[in-house]
Amino acid sequence: MGISRTFLNATTYTVDDNTTTGIPVVSQDKTAGDWRLVTGFTWGIGKRFDTHKPRLLRDVHLLLNVPVYYPNFRSVVLKPSVLLGASFNLNHLRRSFPKTVNINHR
Amino acid sequence: MNRKLFLFYALFCVMALLLSCQRETISIGPNVQDYFYLENQGAKMPVLVEGNTASGVMVVWVHGGPGGTAIGFQNDDNSTKYLESNFGVAYWDQRAAGGSQGSNTPPLALNQYADDLKKLVLLLKYRYGNETKIFLLSHSWGGLVAPAFLTEGTNQQLVRGWINVAGAHNYYLNDSLTRAYLLQFGNDQIGKNRHTADWQKIVDYAEPNVPNYTLDVSRGLNSCADQAEGLIDDIQKSTTGVGSLLTSNKTAFSLFWFASNAGATYFSDLNKAVLYADYSSKLSKLTLPLLCITGKYDFTVPRGLADEVMRKSASTRKRLLILPHSGHICMDNEPVPFYEAVVDFIKQNQ
């Protein structure tokens, strides 16, 4: 669970038509957006490749990620996305060095 | 908090602020596409302006619902072909509809929608010039929002004309007419042995439900009206609808916001509050040019409502167009005569 702050992807205007001059005033809201609670759930399938011995490619996976935002006009918003990914065993790339080093002085 | 973590958060906030700053784009030309939001009473409502803004005329779609979408439904090939080639067209998603957003907003109420529409008209004049000639093109529920706006104060002076398509300016009258039309047409069809079992179900539902309409009864009649249209072969089939939202690539449309907003509207108290919304007595305030369009087979918002607008409005320039092969979504059933009439009306009154 977390907190989300959205930002709108286009210029956002407010209009004040209740001014003393009677002339409406239009202004921009540079930080228009909303705070929401966010939670979510994820389903996925994958294939592991390092069950028997360490490999560089640990797994590939396909995830359906569904964050749920509340509120939007007292309703919830689901914004699902599909993630195709792979994870790697970076330890596999680590080089090993000899523990002792002999230095010959002349 | 250690220094690195503090710097990370500070950088994140600066990036968020920078990314949220959008450059204002106002396009005047024969084929423009502008996208912006109107913020009012807690709601951020998207507006997509397309077409010929150089014409000095702006058509504002006031979509149906409540909880529909102009950016999703009304921005179709026909609107592009007939309207956008001649005029600028503003596709406005109302609060709790389409792609609009809002969190801690006040409960939905009809007067907010009317106020939103007023602010939108003022905003369009600010962006595209104070001399911009604005025409309202409302459909169904939009035909309740439009008179709520037009009959308030001097709002009528802000627009050049109103195209009222299957407008529901009086919900009680609407329900009464829907019931009467269903019974009359249904019994006629049963007598002619056409879809007898289906019509009998509709007639059986409509018959006892009078005169105290509840929200459930109103929705039930609405559902019957939908079913009735499906039983009439004379209606030209629509190529749009909810299915088109899934298959077509609509500019600036989000299915997930639309679904959220449709749910928010459906379960809100707005529907109960407008059950007896009635602008019949205020129609005499209307003096602006008026075009009423309705489908012959519209059971959802029957023709009687358009007849009343024609009878009671004080407009001297008014016309009623009944499309003979249309239901409630007449702009989709018979797009050619629909849009030709709309374009003619605007050109005569701009």
Image (spheres, rainbow, N blue to C red):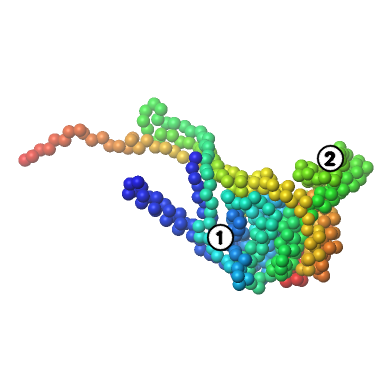
Q: In this view, does B128 lie above or below B248?
A: below
Amino acid type at image mark 1: Thr
Query: x and y percent of residue B237 in the render?
Result: 77, 50
Q: In the rendering, which numbered label is found on residue B35?
A: none
State the residue lying farthest toward the front: A20
Chain hosting mark 2 = B
Number of callouts: 2
Query: x and y percent of residue A77 in the render?
Result: 58, 45
Mark 1 to mark 2 CA distance (whole Å): 47 Å
Left or right, A26 with respect to B344, comes to left
Query: x and y percent of residue B100 in the render?
Result: 61, 53
Amino acid type at image mark 2: Tyr
In the picture, the quarter occupied by the C terminus of chain A is top left
Left or right, B57 with respect to B22, comes to right
Which residue is depicted at the point 51% across and 63% down? B23
Label 2 crowd (10 A; few <14 / some 14-19 / many >=20): some
The image quadrant of residue B212 is top right
Which residue is depicted at the point 32% across and 49% down? B3
Chain hosting mark 1 = A
Q: What element carries label 2?
A: helix
Query: x and y percent of residue B245 in the render?
Result: 65, 49
Is there any visible trace of residue A90 in the rendered image?
yes
Q: Name the residue under label 2.
A: B205
State the residue lying farthest toward the right: B191
Q: In this view, does B66 lie above or below B133?
A: above
State the residue lying farthest toward the top: A52
Say yes or no: labels 1 and 2 on the same chain.
no
For the residue pair B297 and A25, the one nearer the viewer reads as: A25
Q: Mark 1 points at which residue?
A: A12
For the residue pair B85 and B311, the one nearer the viewer reads as: B311
Q: Is mark 1 on a helix, strand or loop?
A: strand
Which residue is depicted at the point 51% across and 35% down? A44
